[in-house]
Amino acid sequence: MAWSDVEFRESNMDNQFIEGDNRFYLNDRDNNMIAEIVFIPTGVNLAIIDHTYVDPSFKGQGIGKKLVALVVKKMRAEHRKIIPLCPFAKHQFDMTPEYQDILA
């Protein structure tokens, strides 16, 4: 069973995201994945954001935006530019001026 919207909003999102192999994700209390972003390091200086998913019951809470921000932060630390192939990530790059410096 997934968290309720109220419980999720009150939790500290930064401490809930898990970094896996080329992805960040978020699980509910029963350890079911409710959100994920997948990125693929390419060569030495690039990464591709391939996929973003948020369970429909959690949409509209900024989880997808936070997932994109986590990848941006990681890729900046690794001095990589990002190619956002995922439509959601592409939209976030188009709408966020702060991401233009890392866009490939």
Image: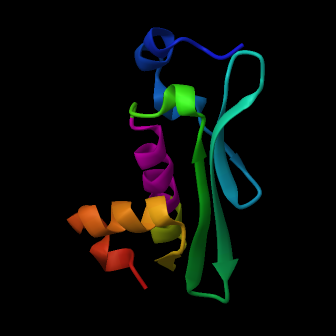
- Residue 65 position within the rendered picture, expressed as x and y whole percent measured from the top left: 41, 47
The reply to whether the magenta stretch includes residue 103 is: no
- Residue 88 position within the rendered picture, expressed as x and y whole percent measured from the top left: 46, 59
Residue 45 figure quarter = bottom right
Looking at the image, residue 4 lies above or below residue 31: above
Tell me which residue sits at (58%, 29%) in the image: 16
Q: Magenta residues: mostly which secondary structure?
A: helix
Picture quarter with the N terminus: top right
Residue 28 figure quarter = top right
Q: Is residue 91 left or right of residue 1?
A: left
**Looking at the image, which is closer to me, 11 or 55?**
55
First to last magenta residue range: 62-73
Q: Is residue 91 left or right of residue 67?
A: left
- Residue 52 position within the rendered picture, expressed as x and y whole percent measured from the top left: 58, 54
Tell me which residue sits at (44%, 44%) in the image: 66
Picture quarter with the C terminus: bottom left
Looking at the image, residue 97 lies above or below residue 52: below
Does residue 29 appear anywhere in the picture? yes
